[in-house]
């Protein structure tokens, strides 16, 4: 869903595909609407140039905001996989959540603080340019830079998840109540409340005939609602899996198959006998691949006797392997990142166990129900 554009300050920067569309949309709105209305009397080529500069300023302001979050996170030892920019914000993909509310507070506040700082810098530039009577071609982008950063700070300070203000609220509640899930639930509910207000407000605007503004607000509201809900899910999973190692919850009794077994043998002696979803393929203890019902299904019935496991198994290099002493959350994140349903647990090249997505959800469900 996103593509990489390079590295900055040691972070990998990626852009969500929606940004291409949004970039041209904003360029169009600025060059054909906003700039001509606010700065009349310029030529259309001038509007497109100042529109382009203003669009790049918007992009750069969002990047600066995200970069400041990530720099603070890195200062406290959190690993940022990469920074992905969305249309009016970004996501610093942390491989772990902060374990301390004070760290979370500083990290969350860094974004809006950086936008206020940048907004103030643009504000000074606007002031200077009006004293010096600089032409509108220079004043217009500076003025836009001021407003966009004030908007970024204001929007991100809304006190609900997934906005920075929601994180600030969460860290404050977390600090007082010492319960991250309860704190997340409060920040999430505020976030969902804000999203409903936006969706409702957007529908009212649309009914009043302001279609574009109304739909835009509904769209942003849905985006926030989605983000709030997934943050809550993520927090519950993180908390349930805290201090649990992969070895603690893996399945040890793994049924394995051999590479020279036919598909018929695999189906009748394994798939129909046991309830596992996948079967590692082993030869003399070495892991060669993985077999699942999906692989077997590809083969027409009349070829079951003449096709072998080694012909259709998922090869070794496409299997995600983890060590038993690593944290369970790491296995969960690897499954999402590589889009697989299970990881093999391996030490010194030997298969020790297997951990599936459903195993992890079972653990999360049980521990959540027991309030652990
Ligand atoms: Zn932010």
Image: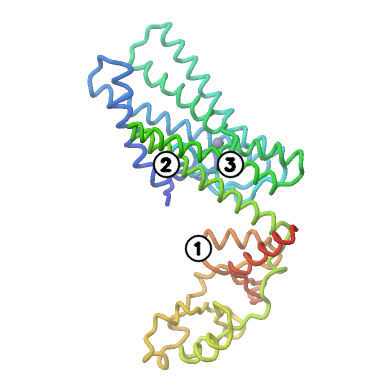
Residue at label 1?
A: 339
Determine the residue positioned at 52% across, 66% down.
340
Residue at 47% across / 44% down in the picture?
223
* Image location (x, y in percent) of residue 225: 51, 45
Determine the residue positioned at 37% across, 30% down. 55
Q: Give the answer, above or below, for where 126 lies relative to 175.
A: above
Tag nearer the camera, 3 or 1:
3
Tell me how far mark 2 sits from mark 1, CA to CA: 27 Å
Give the mark nearer the N terminus: 2 vs 3: 3
Mark 3 near ligand 1 (CB under 8 Å)? Answer: no
Compare marks 2 and 1 and give the one earlier in the sequence. 2
Circle 3 — which element?
A: loop
Q: Is residue 67 visible?
A: no
Report the Cα–Cα distance between label 3 and label 1: 26 Å
Count residues near mark 1 (Cα–Cα under 10 Å), then give few for <14, some for 14-19, many for 20+: few
Residue with the mark numbered 3: 161
Instruction: Please tell me whether residue 333 is drawn above or below residue 300 in the rendered image.
Output: above
**Residue 310 drawn at (x, y percent):** 47, 83
Q: Which residue is mark 2?
A: 219
């Amino acid at each position: 869903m996103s593509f990489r554009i390079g590295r900055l300050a040691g972070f990998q920067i990626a852009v969500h595909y929606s940004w291409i569309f949004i970039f041209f949309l904003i360029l169009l709105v600025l060059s054909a609407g906003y700039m001509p209305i606010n700065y009349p009397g310029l030529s259309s080529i001038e509007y497109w140039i100042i529109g382009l500069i203003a669009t790049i300023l918007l992009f750069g302001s969002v990047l600066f905001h995200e970069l400041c979050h990530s720099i603070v996170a890195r200062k406290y030892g959190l690993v940022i996989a990469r920074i992905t920019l969305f249309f009016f914000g970004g996501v610093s993909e942390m491989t772990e959540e902060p374990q301390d509310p004070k760290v979370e507070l500083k990290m969350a506040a860094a974004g809006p603080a950086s936008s206020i700082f940048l907004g103030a810098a643009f504000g000074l530039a606007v002031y200077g340019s009006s004293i010096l009577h600089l032409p509108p071609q220079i004043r217009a982008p500076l003025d836009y830079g001021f407003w966009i950063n004030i908007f970024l700070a204001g929007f991100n300070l809304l006190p609900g998840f997934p906005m920075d203000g929601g994180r600030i609220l969460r860290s404050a509640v977390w600090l007082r109540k010492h319960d991250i899930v309860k704190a997340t639930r409060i920040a999430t509910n505020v976030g969902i409340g804000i999203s409903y207000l936006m969706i409702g407000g957007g529908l009212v605007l649309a009914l009043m005939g302001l279609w574009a503004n109304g739909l835009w607000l509904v769209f942003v509201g849905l985006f926030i609602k989605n983000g709030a809900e997934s943050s809550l899910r993520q927090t519950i999973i993180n908390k349930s899996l805290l201090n649990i190692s992969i070895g603690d919850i893996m399945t040890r009794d793994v049924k394995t198959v051999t590479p020279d077994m036919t598909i018929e043998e695999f189906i009748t002696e394994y798939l129909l006998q046991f309830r596992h979803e996948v079967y590692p393929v082993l030869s003399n203890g070495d892991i060669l691949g993985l077999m699942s019902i999906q692989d077997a299904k590809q083969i027409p019935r009349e070829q079951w006797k003449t096709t072998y496991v080694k012909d259709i198994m998922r090869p070794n290099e496409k299997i995600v392997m983890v060590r038993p002493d690593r944290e369970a959350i790491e296995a969960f994140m690897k499954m999402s990142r590589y889009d697989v349903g299970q990881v093999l647990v391996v030490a010194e090249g030997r298969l020790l166990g297997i951990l599936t997505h459903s195993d992890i959800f079972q653990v999360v469900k049980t521990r959540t129900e027991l309030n652990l």
